[in-house]
Image (cartoon, helix red, strand yellow):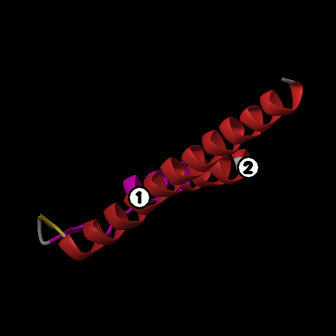
Amino acid sequence: MNLVLQLFQVGSNYWLAKWSNDAEMMVNGTVDKSRRDLYLGVYGGLGVGQVVSVSVSSLALYLGTLAAARVLH
């Protein structure tokens, strides 16, 4: 799960760099809302993926230590 978390973090950093370097965001002096929404949606999805992967990783660690404690005691 830590590998999955790292993939989400790298993807998030890459997507943010791509978003910030997009020269076509401005159309006629205003922000292209469809492009903004696309970038924001993907970036938000990557953030949710990070939260889920950390949560699953923490739950697995918790359950593993609980099982080990039961075996030891």
Q: Is residue 23 visible?
A: no
Q: Give the foreground label among 1 and 2.
A: 2
Residue beneath disc 2: 3
Q: Is residue 18 visible?
A: yes
Residue beneath disc 1: 43
Q: Is residue 28 left or right of residue 20?
A: left
- Name which residue type carries label 2: Leu
Q: 10 Å neighbourhood of mark 1: few (<14), some, or many (≥20)?
A: many
Instruction: Say above or below: 34 vs 42.
Output: below
Furthest residue in direction left, as rendered: 29
Residue in the picture at 78% in, 38% down: 67
Residue situated in front as seen by the camera: 18 or 12: 12
Instruction: Say above or below: 54 vs 65.
Output: below
Q: Is residue 53 left or right of residue 65?
A: left
Q: Position of residue 5 (x, y in %)?
A: 63, 48
Q: Position of residue 61 (x, y in %)?
A: 70, 38
Residue in the picture at 44% in, 55% down: 48
Residue situated in front as seen by the camera: 37 or 58: 58
State the extent of the magenta-drawn residues as a range.
12-27
Residue in the picture at 32% in, 61% down: 40
Furthest residue in direction front, as rendered: 73
Does the magenta run of residues contain 6? no
Q: Is residue 68 left or right of residue 17?
A: right
